[in-house]
Amino acid sequence: MILRRRAAAYGVCRDTGGRVLLTRGSDLAAFPGVWSLPGGGIDHGEHPDDTIVREFAEETGLAVRILRVRAATADLTLLPDDSVEHTDRILYDVEVTGGDLRPESDGTSDLAAWVPPGEVPVLPFTAEVLGTGVEASPVPRPEVDFKRPPGPVQRFGAYGLATDPDGRILLTRIAEGYPGGGLWHLPGGGTDFGETPEQALARELVEETSQRGRVVSLLGVSHRYDPAALGPEGVPLDWHVIRVFYEVRVDEPTVAAVTEAAGGSTSEAAWFTPGELSGLALTELSREALARKS
C-alpha cells in the first residue's frame, strides 16, 4: 500500500449573506467536480499564514486577511489510485480585502464561487468544517509504517503550553544532536500517520513528561525552516517543521520524567515556576507561546 503525507492550509470566508467561498475540483484534482474550501499544500519552507494568502490569490483571484486560526485537524483519504493520504490541515477564518473573483488557470480547481452551505457536493473535511452533508466513512489507519521519502524534510508537530493548578509550566529539554539541542522546549512532537494533532500531543505528553493533560484552546501556528539543520547522524536535513501549539491543563501533576526510549529527541522534563523561566535557554516556540498566553 502506498502512503502519502501532506500539510495544507485552508480558509473559511463568508459574505454578508452567509454564503461561503468555495472552489470546484478540476480534471487535475483527485476528485473532479467536488467542491472545497480554498487552500492547498504548504510549500517547503513556507509559513502556513503565507500559504493561505497565496492559495486564495491563485484559486480565487482575491486578496484576503487572516482573522484567526480556527482549528487544526488531520484526516485519511483513500485516493482513486488506492493510495492512502494523510493530510494535516490548518484552518483559518479570513476576510476579503481586494481583488476580483475569477477561477484558477490550469490548476486543481476550475471554478470559484460564493455558495450557500449545503448546495453543492463538498470534500469530507469541508463538510465537517461547515457542518453540512453526510459524514464520510472513516478510512482505517494502515497497519504499515509510513516511510518518509528522501529529500527535504517537512514535519508537522503539535505542542502544548502545559500548566498545573499552581501555575507551574511544563518544559522539555531537547537532546544534543537534534536541532535546538540543549534548549528548553514545549512538550510535543511530530504527528504519526493517521493521528490528529490533539492525539499526538496527548501521546507526546506521556512519552516526554509522564503527564496527562487536557487541551483548553489552540494558541497559534508557527514554523521553522532551517535548511542547514543537522540530524543526529550529522546529515543535513533541509528541515521544515510546521507547528500548532495549544494551551493545556495538567489537573493532577506528577514528577516530570521522560519515558520514551533512550536516544530520542528529549533528554529531560521538568516543572518550572514563572519566576524560574528567566534563567532558562528557551526555544523560540516556547517564547512565542509564553508571550501569546501572557
Image: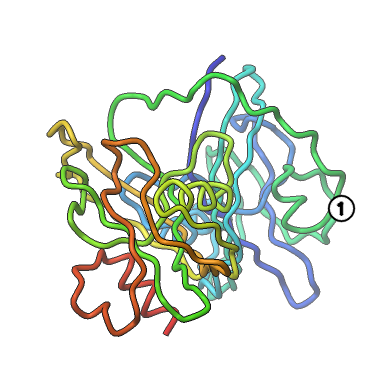
Write the residue at 46% across / 48% down: 204
**Scheme of colours in the image:** rainbow
Residue 52 or residue 77, whichever sits in front: 77
- Which corner quadrant of the image does residue 228 belong to? top left
Residue 69: percent from left, percent from top:
55, 67
Write the residue at 46% across / 68% down: 162
Residue 76: percent from left, percent from top:
63, 34
Residue 13 or residue 236, whichever sits in front: 236
Kind of element beneath mark 1: loop
The C terminus - image quarter: bottom left
Residue 33 or residue 254, whichever sits in front: 254
Q: Amino acid at mark 1?
A: Glu
Up-down: is 204 above or below 277?
above
**In the image: residue 125, left or right of residue 102:** right
Residue 42: percent from left, percent from top:
43, 48
**In the image: residue 245, left or right of residue 100:** left
Seen from this angle, which residue lies furthest top? 1
Up-down: is 206 above or below 130?
above
Label 1, on which residue?
Answer: 119
